[in-house]
Amino acid sequence: TSFFLSYFQVSTGAYKRQVHEVPLGKQITDPALIEKITWATWTSILGDEVIGIWPRNADKADVNCACVTHAGLNIVTGDDFGLVKLFDFPCTEKFVSGYFILI
């Protein structure tokens, strides 16, 4: 019998990224293991994969939400300034200028 492990990630109120194993809820802290996980969806504002969504001199609370497209090629963010921005995903280079989306 074969099985695969499932994981989920959360962003804490202290702006820490945590990864947990399902169904036990055990926290995974090994960066090498976390790096190997392929996520089915992504809505986190934290992690190496989204470091570029944060503008220079941003407060921790400036970026409020993020969602990767179904194709996994782009990520859309919303921030405290009422802006919706589009970035390539992953966005691993710091201070990337996203495309502004007018709504």
Image: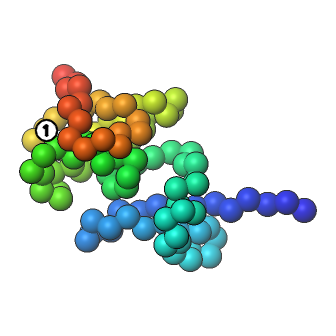
Q: Mark 1: few, some, or many residues within 10 Å (few <14, many ≥20)?
A: few
- Horizontal side of 94 relative to 81 (left or right) equals right
Residue found at x 56% / y 74%: 25
Count all numbered tags in the image, as a single digit: 1
Does residue 46 appear anywhere in the picture?
A: yes
Percent across and percent down for residue 34 are: 53, 61
Q: In the depicted view, which residue is nearer to us: 97 or 82?
A: 97
Would you place residue 45 above or below residue 27 in this image?
Answer: above
- Please tell me in which quadrant of the rendered image residue 33 appears: bottom right
Residue found at x 62% / y 76%: 24
Q: In the depicted view, which residue is nearer to us: 93 or 13?
A: 93
Q: In the depicted view, which residue is nearer to us: 35 or 83?
A: 35
- Coloring scheme used: rainbow
For badge 1, the amino acid type reads Gly
Residue found at x 61% / y 67%: 22
Percent across and percent down for residue 50 are: 34, 46
- The residue furthest right is 1
Residue found at x 45% / y 30%: 73
Where does the C terminus fall, quadrant-wise?
Answer: top left
Percent across and percent down for residue 17 are: 38, 64
The residue pinned by badge 1 equals 82
Percent across and percent down for residue 88 are: 37, 31
- Please tell me in which quadrant of the rendered image residue 75 appears: top left
Where does the N terminus fall, quadrant-wise?
Answer: bottom right
Does residue 44 appear anywhere in the picture?
A: no
The secondary element bearing badge 1 is classed as loop
